Image (cartoon, rainbow, N blue to C red):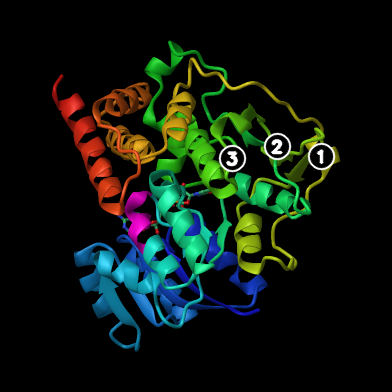
Amino acid sequence: MKKHLSILGATGSIGTQTIDILSSIDAEVVALTTNRNIKLLEQQARALHPKLCVAFDETAARDLKIALADTDITVMSGMDGLVAAATHPDCDTVVTAVVGMVGLLPTLAAVDAGKDIALANKETLVCAGGLVMEAARKKGVHILPVDSEHSAIFQCVQACQGNPLDKIILTASGGPFFGKTAEELRTVTREQALKHPNWSMGAKITTDSATMMNKGLELIEAMWLYDLPQEKIEIVVHRESIIHSLIEFADGAVLAQLGVPDMRLPIQYALTYPARVPCKVPRLSLAEVGKMTFYPPDDKAFPAMNLARQAASRKGNAGAVLNGANEAAVGLFLSDKLPFWRIPELVAQTMERIPFVNDPTLDDILTSDREAREAVLSLVGAE
Ligand code: NAD
Ligand code: MG
């Protein structure tokens, strides 16, 4: 069935790979958004002829309007622009490929407007999984996972025949610092953190992979998507990133989804589900892979995973606090204002500081996010 897409974060790693697979599927683009990469957005707009283009940044939006003056494309900016893209009447599916909790309001607006969501923006579920999943249930819309692990689980779930999942096994590459001790992590640099062994991704998620917070965020994402408590989600390090995740049934049978590490397959499946069509991604050759390795995760060197487990057990506003603190700390790290090892420490300190809210409203989530970011800045400034 033809899809009419709004791609939020079209100029990023997931956004550009989404556009790359459009030639393999039956789809039309209704809206494209960026933060401020208007050069690329203009190129994409000229190739894809959307109705609406959005630059979140006001100045960038002004320049984009001038650049697209010879077209009939509407140009907008800010949160109003993102929400307009997410709820455009001509769109049926929203690809949420923006980075960070800025994706929350547009995702909720899209669900409210009855759009299916191809969800890459995991921060949205980490912050407000309860609200988003409940809204999706009420509206009867699909939340289709793009994240490779969650897509793997989703693909395995097709074989459930109504049987419940007993367990999820999330695979983790281990990132660039696999095998390092907490002591050794005290001297790693931004450049080293940004060199991921298997995946080429945006700077924020690459940093999260290096701290293993990415796996923590994915654990919370899996908890909401598949309605399992965190104790039923195991993390295993699998260096080769060939097995994208696994599920286990009551009888102990384990199913896995395998493939070369390339996001275009999970992106494409989110857009063609339940159908499968040929994909540009190279085929897997197990003989070429040769061997696959598995290790328990190192919670001592990478405490972020346990912080996420705590947030997953507490629920309430804990995910928003964890995520807000992490986004702020990663932002500081990426602008060379914080050493790598302080990222999880600041998240832990922030989680202790912000009061717990049990059944948070959207306002509570937004407040907790703001308070967490402020707490990180004040903890760093206080030194
Ligand atoms: P990226 O940094 O490459 O791209 C982010 C996109 O969002 C860009 O288009 C950027 O212009 C836009 N953006 C950034 N800040 C914004 C703001 N404040 N307002 C509006 N737009 C803004 O990031 P990415 O690697 O493509 O990741 C996007 C999301 O997908 C993240 O949530 C990430 O965790 C998730 N994800 C990414 C991958 C991957 O392979 N890259 C895999 C799984 C999940
Ligand atoms: Mg992932």
Check disc 1 and report its element: helix, strand or loop: helix
Q: Residue at x 28, y 63 (%)?
A: 56
Q: Quadrant of ligand 2?
A: top right
Residue 74 visible, this orientation: yes
Q: Which residue is mark 2?
A: 166
Q: CA distance from mark 3 to mark 2?
A: 9 Å
Farthest residue to the left: give it: 382
**Part of the protein shown in magenta:** 100-106
Q: Is mark 2 within 8 Å of ligand 2?
A: no
Quarter of the image for the C terminus: give it: top left
Q: Is residue 209 above or below residue 353?
A: below
Mark drawn on residue 288: 1
Of 237 and 89, the residue lying toward us: 89
Three-letter residue code for mark 2: Asp
Of 367 and 266, the residue lying toward us: 367
Q: Where residue 102 sits: x, y (%)?
A: 33, 54
278 lies left or right of 35: right
Three-letter residue code for mark 1: Glu
Q: Is residue 225 above or below residue 376?
A: below
Q: Where residue 306 sits: x, y (%)?
A: 47, 24
Question: How crowded is the residue under tag 2: few (<14 C-alpha within 10 Å), some, or many (20+)?
Answer: some
233 lies left or right of 371: right
Q: Which residue is mark 3?
A: 228
Specify the quadrant of the image occupied by residue 89: bottom left
Check disc 3 and report its element: helix, strand or loop: loop
Of 284 and 130, the residue lying toward us: 130
Residue 194 visible, this orientation: no
Mark 3 or mark 2: which comes first in sequence?
A: 2
Specify the quadrant of the image occupied by residue 107: bottom left
